[in-house]
Image (tube, grey):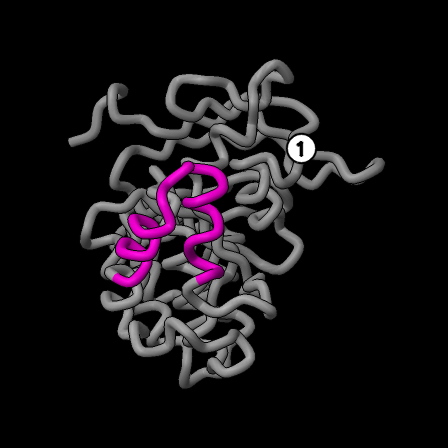
């Protein structure tokens, strides 16, 4: 049972225009601590824009994003302080190619969190151990498979001790046989209680791991429900049509 006290992110009336094109038309959402919100929808529906607005990688045109009780869309807020509490994993891995895996991971904690190199290295190695990549710490990204790169990208975000992890289609750039290893890491994170917002096409993940599944269509949330209800008893006609094409 969740209460208002454990709301980590509250979105009110979120709108986003690109030129004259209204991509988000008034999104309202609540993400509680420990939630795994899975956001699905057709290409161009606005789901990735919604996710990227949560940490202001896209600047909302209107609306509030209240994170930890603070409206981060307020121009007086230092967004960089709040972004440190939000881990972000993209379709592409965004690893620095000239740095080893370990150096990629400790850069943020040392520069931004002011941790010692020794402390950051110890924590990074523990995380790499958890995802089965401790033996690749001194390799460069070019020496890794796509699935390994994405696992490194996830644990790099975790090195910043975030309160929430945002995933923007983290498996869409991977070969099919590599998808499972990345989803397995995400499942473990969810089991450990990490708050997550995941934009994905992986319906099996949504069914198994999501606490709340959200369907975005033409810039609005048209339906949201726990996975069992969402997939077995969809109410919106557009959602029914979408699900009939993906199953």
Image label count: 1
Image quadrant where residue 131 sits: bottom left
Q: Is residue 239 above or below residue 110?
A: below
Write down the region rendered in magenta: 103-125
Q: State the SS at label 1.
A: loop
Specify whether residue 119 is painted magenta: yes
Q: Residue at x 58, y 61 (%)?
A: 94
Q: Report the front residue among 247 and 167.
A: 167
Q: Residue placed at 31% from the left, 43% from the top? A: 195
Residue 174 shown left or right of residue 58 in the figure:
left
Magenta stretch: dominant SS?
helix
Task: Locate the C terminus and report the quarter of the image it occupies.
Answer: bottom left
Which residue, as the protein is rendered here, is positioned at the far top? 76
Q: Quadrant of the N terminus?
A: top left
Q: Is residue 97 left or right of residue 240?
A: right
Is residue 11 at least partly visible in the picture? yes
Q: Is residue 213 left or right of residue 167?
A: left
The residue identified by callout 1 is 59
Above or below, comparing residue 189 to residue 245 in the picture: above
């Amino acid at each position: 049972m969740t209460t208002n006290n454990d709301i980590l992110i509250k979105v009110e009336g979120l709108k986003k225009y690109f030129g004259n094109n209204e991509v988000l038309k008034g999104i309202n959402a609540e993400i509680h601590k420990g939630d795994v919100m899975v956001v699905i929808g057709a290409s161009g529906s606005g789901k990735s824009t919604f996710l990227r607005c949560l940490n202001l990688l896209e600047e909302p045109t209107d609306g509030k994003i209240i994170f930890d009780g603070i409206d981060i869309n307020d121009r007086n807020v230092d967004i960089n302080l709040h972004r440190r509490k939000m881990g972000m994993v993209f379709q592409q891995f965004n690893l620095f190619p000239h740095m080893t895996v370990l150096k990629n991971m400790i850069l943020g904690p040392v520069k931004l969190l002011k941790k010692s190199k020794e402390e950051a290295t110890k924590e990074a190695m523990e995380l790499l151990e958890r995802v089965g990549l401790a033996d690749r710490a001194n390799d460069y990204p070019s020496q890794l498979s796509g699935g390994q790169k994405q696992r490194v990208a996830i644990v790099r975000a975790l090195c910043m001790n975030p309160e929430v992890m945002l995933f923007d289609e983290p498996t869409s750039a991977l070969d099919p046989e590599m998808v499972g290893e990345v989803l397995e890491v995400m499942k473990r994170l969810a089991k450990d209680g990490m708050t997550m917002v995941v934009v994905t096409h992986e319906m099996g993940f949504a069914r198994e791991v999501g606490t709340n599944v959200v369907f975005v269509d033409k810039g609005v949330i048209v339906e949201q429900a726990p996975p069992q209800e969402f997939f077995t008893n969809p109410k919106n006609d557009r959602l029914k049509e979408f699900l009939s094409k993906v199953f």
